[in-house]
Amino acid sequence: MDAASPVTHRTIAVVGGSGSGKTTLIEALLHRAGAIARKGSVELGTTVCDHEPEEIARHTTLGVSLAYLTWTTEEETVGALTLVDAPGHPDFAGALDTALSIADLALVAVSAVDGVSAGTKAAWAAAEAAGVPRMIVVTQEDRARADFRRVLQQLRDTFGGHVLPIELPVGEEADFHGIADILSEHALVYDDAGHHHEEAIPADLAEEERRLHRDATEEIVSHDDAQLEAYLDGREPSARALERTLAAEVAAGTAVPVLLCSAYSETGIDRVADLLLELAPAPGDRDGRIVIGVDAEGDGGSSHAVSTDASGDTLVHVFHTVADPFVGQIAMIKVLSGLLRPGDRLHNATTGTEERMPALFRLRGSEHLPADALRAGDVGAVAKLAGSPSGSLLWTRAQTGARPRRHPLRHPVYAVALEPVSQSDDAKLSTALARLVADDPTLVVDRTGNATILRGLGDTHVAVAVERLARVLGVHVTTSAAPVAFRETIAGPAEAEGKLKKQSGGHGQFADVHLLVSPLAAGGGFEFVDATVGGSVPKAYVPAVERGAREALAAGGPQGHPVVDVRVELRGGRAHSVDSSEMAFRTAASLGVKAALVQAGTVLLEPVSAVTVTVPSHLQGPVLTDLSGRRGRVSGTETTDDGAARILATVPDAELAHYVLDLRSLTGGEAELTIAPDRYERAPHGAGG
């Protein structure tokens, strides 16, 4: 279907914890819509959305994947859905944020067997933070130990009374074969092909269904004055009228409908598709926001609403880029306003680049579906936008200094050191890492000493990045534990002479400096003082002395680590009218500083980070005990608005290498963790060896 056709389109982020059946649900929706001939399997690595080799190997979603389909509802309304498969693994929370940034609605998948998990809560919190309305679908209703009512109670206990069931299962586990529609009060009974016919509500469900119908009706009409007045007069609204009011409540976030299904048998799958089109807000119901007036670093600016206006200026959000080994860079885009066609010329308001739009397509996993145009609210993709990385805005206006609203900040909490396998890999590493970070901003690259460090949200996050570095970008590395960034400081004041005297024919090299090297207070950094008198060291050479001193400290002290918190005072020296030079004085200063460090000795300093852990209150004790065992010092505890415990502590970096993994194990994945550099302290004896 031509992308510019006047169809209803909704972008749905399918979110939830790992194992909740998100990818399998999307597979069933694609199959039921006729978009694929047969359903794939996560276990066999044949699903549409989990198509990357790293996902197939791990049997889980690791990034953002799009799946486009068209659907005709029971009312014969033709619509389109772009389903965004988002990871449930905590290491890939950045991809979850990306999916939510362009979603009209978040469909939260919850397993009827496992119920509300840490991943469910994380997905819910992310959607809430992004301001995205939610619906819930209870999946895996046909599995052993499926229990819809238990899960519904968990949902209400966890997320509140606005969680509103509008369906009940007819049968459960192996006997699951239908759905009781609470709003219309009839049952949909399914055959083996996933098609249904209507029946009366089964007798064993009649009383429960009637009670839930009454509760749902009263909840829905309470938000509509005309419906409420009619209801109080004894005129009950029709199912269609209730759905229309419910759709407004979903958009406002005051109601969260609960659906149910089995992706395996496809029981209820058509209902899920119908209700996504009927209840999800239209793109225009949720004005997007952009930030205008940002500086070259992307900071500052003020937020502005963008109405989804098909006749407005063309404004395109590049929300995600992926490196494809065959096609090159693919940019996933959402049209915020106007109409986008191939050949359109747009200005990148974020980077300043001019872009001519190549062929447009929609994505169904790795499949490219050609599109003649994309209209306001549509999601699609283009290849080879060289100057438009993730987080860019493309505009018909000659606007500069604008960007999309930023995602929540996700702090890296796990790190490895990278070592190129070959000289060729070493030459390409820096560029490849920059490309990797552009595709996934939750990755951070820095250097500790001579080591290249890759930081991410967990061990799986970093491992997948290394695998993609090799597969997609052709750079092979080995990994090891990230070194702790120890430092040294001089133990006390020391006077030393740095002297260079070389004569090898012609001009020689001569410089002589007298230095006093002494410690500064913690955090003092570096201080240089010129205390010479009488021109013993010519003023032209004093900057060279300072530079030589800095280089000596950076090169490392007697224990092999950079030296910090030091004052270097130049007290005197000598120069030669012919043989002295800036290089000679740099070298002499370096020799003098090194001599002083050996003479006075150095104290080893270890980095200490500020750690914040947020956990359910009943897990506060085990977390405090664990932090104590890591030489952590708790500076305070707080109670959050939702009753969780927030623990503030400082912990030496040497104790934090695998902390995120241990914390998840200790708390069953219930903890939120941030780690930020704080200060340096004296290390215990034997550290840093």
Image (cartoon, grey):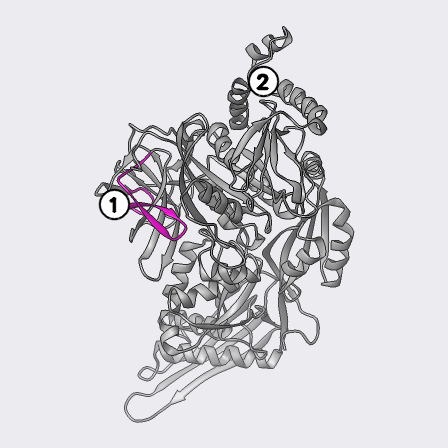
Residue marked by disc 2: 223
Residue marked by disc 1: 357
Is 27 left or right of 625, judged from the image as shown?
left
Q: Position of residue 545 (x, y in %)?
A: 43, 73
- Queried whether the magenta region covers residue 594, the answer comes back as no
Q: CA distance from mark 2 to mark 1?
A: 45 Å
Q: Amino acid at mark 2?
A: His
Is 555 left or right of 354, judged from the image as shown?
right
**Identity of the residue drawn at 25% across and 41% down:** 346
For residue 329, what is the image quadrant? Answer: bottom left
Q: Earlier in the sequence, mark 2 or mark 1?
A: 2
Q: Position of residue 183 (x, y in %)?
A: 59, 23
For residue 627, what is the image quadrant? Answer: bottom right
Vertical side of 84 occupied by 557: above or below: below
Q: Secondary structure at mark 2?
A: loop
**Identity of the residue drawn at 50% across and 44% down:** 28
